[in-house]
Amino acid sequence: MAFPERAEGGSNQWRGNCSPQVVAKLIQFVKKCRRYEKNKDFLFLDPMSGSGTSQDVAEELHIPSVLYDLNPHPPKGIGNWNALKDEVAHSADLIFFHPPYHDIIRYSGNMWGRPHEDDLSRCENYEDYIEKLNYVIKKLYFSLRQNGYLAILVGDIRQKGIFHSIAADMLHIGNMKSWIVKGQFHCTSSKTQYSGKPFIPIVTETLVLFQKEEILLVPFSIRREGIFQIQEQDSIALTWFHLLRMTLEQLNGHATLKQLYQELREHPKAKKNKNYEARIRATLYEHADCFLPLARGTFRLKYR
């Protein structure tokens, strides 16, 4: 994948901004999938939206979109959204995640505002960055709708003579559908002169595409492979909203309160909450736009 000419969308003055054509190709690919041909509720989400490239592309393609960003005053979208602390308030069919490449470009205190402690471009070290990045990846994956796609665009970096491939080091979750090498153009690092040891320039990025085919069984790998079951393993990245959504998906999109109580009573989140039944009811009503009442005490998912 290579786009030497950036095309229109977002701001080419925003460092690290990817080509709008990457976003357009992703949306067009997912929309062509049979599951989405008649889905009028298709939603595209960009949780680190920068200058708003994704919204420009989505509008051009007439696709509903939601943009988040840590920047309190982003050019477009919802500002002051903290990927490490805030809930993903939407469930999407396609999430395009283009995080900072560790500290290669500092965003808070540089591209906008003051330095922010939860800015992924200001992590203490590479290990800290990968740990936080993986937490955000889990959070985003859990927020996908069934059969939805998570696209992650990351690069390779070299620090103090050590080469790091973020795509290889990060969490791989769900079913990998594609590993795409993307050419980089007009990078500041391309102009840097290095002395001493031979230098091999980094001229590519990696776009990894995962699909959420299974709901409660999640294939994953972090230098090793395995499967964890959400009902058996708690995660602070999993909110009640998305736990209920996945449980309803597992129950074919509709269930009674009694069924939900029974399905979730042994879940670690329920065991930590003596009033878990009240928490389930509250979550259903807090997200009334997603959980629709069929009859008294019975709910269905809006997006099916």
Image: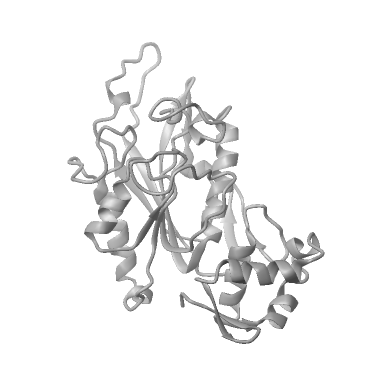
Q: Is residue 13 visible?
A: yes
Q: In which quarter of the image is residue 142?
A: bottom right
Is 20 above or below relative to 93? above
Is 287 above or below relative to 72? below
Q: What residue lies at 38% left-to-right and 72% top-to-bottom?
A: 41
Measured as percent of width and height from the top left, residue 140 is found at 51, 55
Measured as percent of width and height from the top left, residue 29 is found at 30, 63
Could you tell whether 59 is left or right of 71 in the image? left
Q: Residue furthest right?
A: 274
Is 235 above or below relative to 81? below
Q: Which of 131 and 161 is in front in this view?
A: 131
Q: Which of 158 and 115 is in front in this view?
A: 115
Q: Quadrant of residue 156?
A: top left
Q: What residue lies at 59% left-to-right and 33% top-to-bottom?
A: 127
Q: What residue lies at 19% left-to-right and 45% top-to-bottom?
A: 8
Q: Nearer the viewer, residue 196 or 260?
A: 260
Q: Nearer the viewer, residue 105 or 272?
A: 272
Q: Which residue lies furthest to the bottom in this view?
A: 295
Measured as percent of width and height from the top left, residue 246 is found at 58, 70
Could you tell whether 43 is left or right of 272 in the image? left
Q: Can residue 24 be seen in this view?
A: no
